[in-house]
Image (cartoon, rainbow, N blue to C red):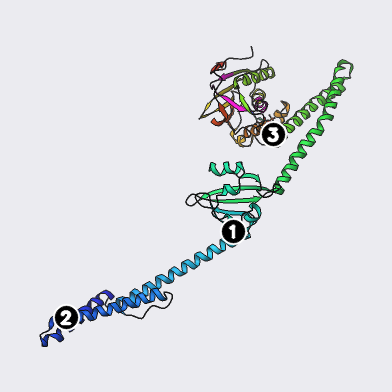
Amino acid sequence: MRRPWSRELWRLTWLAGLGALLGWPFGATALGLAAGLALCLAYHLRQLRALHHWLTRNPQAEPPAAGGLWGELFDRLYRYQKGQRHTQQRLRDTLRRIQESSEAMRDSVVMLDSHGDLEWWNSAAERMLGLRATHDRGQHITNLIRDPRFVAYFNARDYREPLTLPSPIDERQVLQFQLTLYGDDERLLMARDITRLHRLEEMRRDFVANVSHELRTPLTVLAGYLETFGDLGEALPSRLARGLAQMQSQTTRMQNLVNDLLLLSRLEIDRSGDDHAPLDVAPLLESIRRDAQALAGERQTLDVAIDEPRRLVGSESELRSAISNLAFNAVRYAGDGCHIVLRWKPHGDGACVEVEDDGEGIDPVHIPRLTERFYRVDKGRSTATGGTGLGLAIVKHVLLRHDARLEIDSLPDRGARFRCVFPARRLRPGAVNDSHAPRASRAGGQR
Ligand code: ADP
């Protein structure tokens, strides 16, 4: 079978030849040839007209009937159009299903374009965020959720963690916002109502804080009486004296536990930042070193090394508590004859406080869980040294409140290094006349 294109050529040659042949007996070969070609042109113009007619009037209809090249062209165009219609229908169905499932969701879903303007949202977003279809399409999201914390979150473009905020239309409702970047710099905003979870968490925190607070007074009374009885010393029978000593040590343990629980609750409940001010780290480390040295006695030596001149913006009491926890842990767990160094030094474009010892170290399997409440590597040892299991949890919370993170590096028998890493925005230039300019001080037990 001939291919359509060669059939068209054949038609052209045939008509032109027939015209020339018919004209030849009358001496008008050229005229006959032209007439044949004109006939061929007329045929193509007719097909073109049919094509134009079909495409402009009713492209959905069956194509005009034609044979040869035109017939094949019509067929292909028709099949292509049909394919396109199917694809469009499939896309429309998918879009409708996505919109229906988003509508059925109880969480808010808002689609933002690359500028952050609102493109589409579901009805949960209207209820939770107060968006109105008639007014808000095309508005920038920060015009509608104006909380500075949300604006900072939106602009930071770091959406690894969600943001918890009160709803912009109802202060009592707590929402968790999560932004996701997709496509061509577009963003998807999801908001969930976590009011119930938030209340439960608040109740848990308040309960722990209240119980700890209530336990404080009876424990103080108990400790007071035990101390008074202890003063009787020799007068007590030896069995009673042994029991009394145990009661005293357990009461002290409970007091430490209650104090740590109260501190943790306060760190969780209080809004941070009220008492933050630029601090000289050197005198802070020096005073912690003195306290730790008193605890270590002759068993260990402690140094302070200052290699960073900048000051740190933070709460002195909270930072003292966190760094003291690290230093006292080093004294308690590193073992006798160890050397402990407290450092303030540059780290990337920020700085870090480092507490390093050359003691027994920690097996790396424990490191990811060390900051969990009540997680201990060796429970018996921790209890014997007066540990509550809350020390590193307190350190983690304090650092969170200072935009900092805790890095732990250790190997068994190769010592441990705890680093509190602060970002550059937490640092201020040191005082001009700074007596704590970078230096290293040897400050062992002899100080
Ligand atoms: P604890 O109150 O029991 O000391 P922490 O949260 O402060 O609880 O510490 C958790 C555990 O980490 C401790 O039980 C101890 O085993 C381990 N640890 C902390 N610091 C050191 C260190 N410098 N050397 C070895 N082990 C340590």
SS type, badge 2: helix
The quarter of the image that holds ligand 1 is top right
Can residue 91 be seen?
yes
The residue that disc 2 covers is 33
Can residue 159 be seen?
no
Q: Amino acid at mark 1?
A: Thr
Q: Is residue 308 above or below residue 372?
A: above
Q: CA distance from mark 3 to mark 2?
A: 101 Å
Q: Position of residue 189 (x, y in %)?
A: 57, 51
Please tell me whether residue 84 belongs to the stretch shown in magenta.
Answer: no
Magenta residues, as a range? 304-326
Q: Are marks 1 and 3 in contact (CB under 8 Å)?
A: no
The residue that disc 1 covers is 134
Q: Mark 3: is the Cβ under 8 angstroms from ligand 1?
A: no
The residue that disc 3 covers is 267
Q: Nearer the viewer, residue 254 or 20?
A: 20
Please, which residue is most extreme toward the front here?
A: 135
Q: Amino acid at mark 2?
A: Leu
Q: Disc 3 or 2, which lies upstream in sequence?
A: 2
Label 2 Cα neighbours within 10 Å, binned few <14 / some 14-19 / many ≥20: many
Q: Disc 1 or 3, which lies upstream in sequence?
A: 1
On screen, residue 432 versus residue 373, left or right, reads left
Q: CA distance from mark 1 to mark 3?
A: 44 Å
Q: Nearer the viewer, residue 72 or 229?
A: 72
Q: Disc 2 or 1, which lies upstream in sequence?
A: 2
Q: Position of residue 53 (x, y in %)?
A: 37, 77
